[in-house]
Image (cartoon, rainbow, N blue to C red):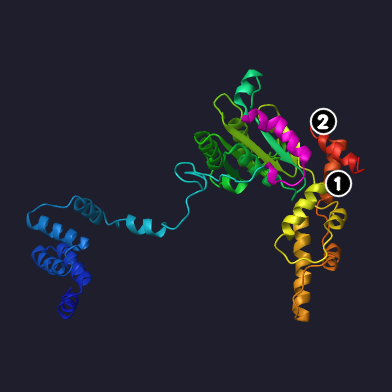
C-alpha cells in the first residue's frame, strides 16, 4: 500500500490508479482516506462509474452501513474458500457461439429466413419434373379454396431424390420462390449435438420456428443422414432417437404443421427409414434425373455467359455431355476456361475459349453419376418390391440399363 500511495503522489492525475487505491483503502477499513482519493478522482473524471461505486462504499462504511455483498464475502473468507469470479468466467466464454437451433437456427428473433427470388422458370429443362411438381404440390398449395372444395389435403411432404449434382437443392429454393414463402434449409450438422436429448430438442425447436413463421418451406438436405433406417442404428441410441423425433414432428397427434411445407432431398432414398416414406410424412417421391438436352443447354449457357468465347458449338457440347450432371457441366466449363487461360499466359496473348479447350476438358472431366446409376439399378431391380421407385426404373429403361 505504501508503494501505491507513493505512486499516486508521483502521478496525481492517474484516475484508474487513484480508484484502485481507494478501493483497497475501503477494504482495509480506512474509508476516510478512500473518500479523499475518490473525490480527487472525480474532480478529474466526474462521470467515472468505478470511482462513484467506491465512493458509495466508502460513504456506507463511514455511516456504519455494510454493503449487501460483504457478509457473503466475509463468510466465504472465514470458510477458507475463494470466491468464484463470475464476471471473469463470463468474459472467458463471451465469444463462444450459441448451440445451433437452441434459440433460432441462424435466423433473427422474429424468425427471419431466406426468401428465394428464383422460381421454376429459372430452372432450365426438367419439364416433366416441373409438371409433376405443379400437379402434386404447387397447384393445391396456391389454391386453398379449390383444395377445400375437392377435399384435397396437404399432409406430409415431398422428397426429391436423384444423383448428386443434379439440382435438388436448386429446385427446393425455386419451390419456395414459387410460393413466396420463407425458406429454412436444415442439415445434419444443424441438428446433431453430443449431449443426450439435445439433438431431439434442436429438431423440435426447428419445427416450432417453422410453425410460428408459416407459411414457409422447411428443407432437409441429405435426409438419409437425418432419417436413416433404424435397423441400421441398433448400436446408436442417439441417432435412433433423432429419427423417432423426426417421425413425431412430421406426423403425430401433437404435431400441427399447417402452412409448413416439408421438402427433403437425398441421393439415397433407399437408405431413408420406411416410416418416413409412408403417407403423412414424405408420401410423395420425385426423381430429379440428370439434366436432359434442354437443361444441359441452359446450364452450359449459364456457366459460359460472362466468359470470352469464339466458335463455341453449344449443340455439340450438349450432345457430348449426355451423361453429365449439372455439377459436371460446371466443372467442364471451368476446365475449358482454365486451358484457355493457361494458353494465354504461355503465349502472352489473351484469347477466348474455343472448342479445342472443350476437347481437352472432355478428356479430363468424366461423368460423376455412373456409380450412382449402378447402385440405383441394383435397388430397383432387386430390392424395390413396393414399387416406390417406379419412375427411377422407367428412367433406367430409357437409358437401356434395366
The answer to whether residue 281 is left or right of residue 29 is: right
Of residue 391 and residue 332, the one placed in the foreground of this image is 332
Residue 67 drawn at (x, y percent)? 17, 52
Residue for point 72% across, 55% down:
302
Query: In which quadrant of the rendered image does the C terminus lie?
Result: top right
Q: Main secondary structure of the magenta part?
A: helix
Residue for point 92% across, 43% down:
400
Residue 398 drawn at (x, y percent)? 89, 41
Query: In which quadrant of the rendered image does the N terminus lie?
Result: bottom left
Residue 176 drawn at (x, y percent)? 62, 40
User: 294 above or below 145?
Assistant: below
Residue 363 drawn at (x, y percent)? 86, 64
Q: Secondary structure at mark 2?
A: loop
Q: Residues within 10 Å of mark 2 (few under 14, many from 20)?
A: few
The residue to which callout 2 is attached is 387
Q: Secondary structure at mark 1?
A: helix
Q: Which residues are magenta?
A: 120-142
Residue for point 20% across, 71% down:
15
The residue to which callout 1 is attached is 374
Amino acid at each position: 500500500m505504501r508503494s501505491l500511495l507513493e505512486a499516486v503522489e508521483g502521478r496525481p492525475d492517474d484516475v484508474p490508479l487513484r480508484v484502485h487505491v481507494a478501493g483497497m483503502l475501503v477494504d482495509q477499513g480506512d474509508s476516510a482516506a478512500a473518500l479523499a482519493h475518490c473525490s480527487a478522482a472525480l474532480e478529474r473524471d466526474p462521470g467515472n462509474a468505478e470511482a462513484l461505486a467506491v465512493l458509495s462504499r466508502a460513504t456506507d462504511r463511514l455511516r456504519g452501513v455494510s454493503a449487501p455483498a460483504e457478509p457473503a464475502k466475509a463468510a466465504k473468507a472465514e470458510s477458507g474458500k475463494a470466491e468464484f469470479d463470475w464476471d471473469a468466467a463470463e468474459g472467458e466464454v463471451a465469444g463462444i457461439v450459441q448451440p445451433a437451433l437452441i434459440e433460432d437456427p441462424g435466423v433473427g428473433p422474429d424468425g427471419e429466413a431466406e426468401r428465394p427470388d428464383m422460381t421454376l422458370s429459372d430452372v432450365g429443362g426438367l419439364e416433366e419434373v416441373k409438371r409433376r411438381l405443379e400437379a402434386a404440390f404447387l397447384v393445391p398449395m396456391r389454391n386453398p379454396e379449390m383444395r377445400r372444395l375437392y377435399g384435397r389435403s396437404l399432409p406430409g411432404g415431398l422428397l426429391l431424390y436423384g444423383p448428386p449434382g443434379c439440382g435438388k437443392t436448386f429446385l427446393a429454393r425455386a419451390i419456395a420462390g414459387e410460393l413466396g414463402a420463407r425458406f429454412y434449409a436444415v442439415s445434419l450438422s444443424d441438428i446433431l449435438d453430443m449431449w443426450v436429448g439435445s439433438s431431439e430438442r434442436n429438431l423440435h425447436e426447428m419445427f416450432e420456428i417453422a410453425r410460428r413463421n408459416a407459411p414457409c418451406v422447411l428443407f432437409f438436405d441429405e435426409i438419409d443422414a437425418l432419417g436413416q433406417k433404424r435397423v441400421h442404428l441398433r448400436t446408436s441410441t442417439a441417432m435412433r432417437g433423432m429419427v423417432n423425433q423426426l417421425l413425431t414432428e412430421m406426423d403425430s397427434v401433437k404435431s400441427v404443421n399447417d402452412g409448413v411445407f416439408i421438402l427433403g432431398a437425398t441421393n439415397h432414398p433407399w437408405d431413408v427409414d420406411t416410416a418416413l416414406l409412408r403417407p403423412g410424412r414424405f408420401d410423395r417421391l420425385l426423381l430429379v434425373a440428370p439434366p436432359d438436352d434442354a437443361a444441359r443447354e441452359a446450364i452450359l449457357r449459364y456457366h459460359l455467359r460472362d466468359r470470352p468465347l469464339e466458335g463455341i458449338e453449344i449443340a455439340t457440347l450438349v450432345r457430348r455431355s449426355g451423361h453429365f450432371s449439372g455439377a459436371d457441366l460446371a466443372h467442364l466449363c471451368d476446365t475449358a476456361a482454365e486451358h484457355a487461360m493457361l494458353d494465354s499466359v504461355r503465349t502472352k496473348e489473351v484469347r477466348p475459349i474455343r472448342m479445342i479447350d472443350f476437347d481437352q476438358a472432355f478428356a479430363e472431366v468424366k461423368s460423376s453419376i455412373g456409380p450412382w446409376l449402378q447402385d440405383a439399378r441394383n435397388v430397383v431391380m432387386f430390392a424395390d418390391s413396393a414399387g416406390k421407385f417406379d419412375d427411377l426404373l422407367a428412367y433406367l429403361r430409357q437409358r437401356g440399363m434395366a
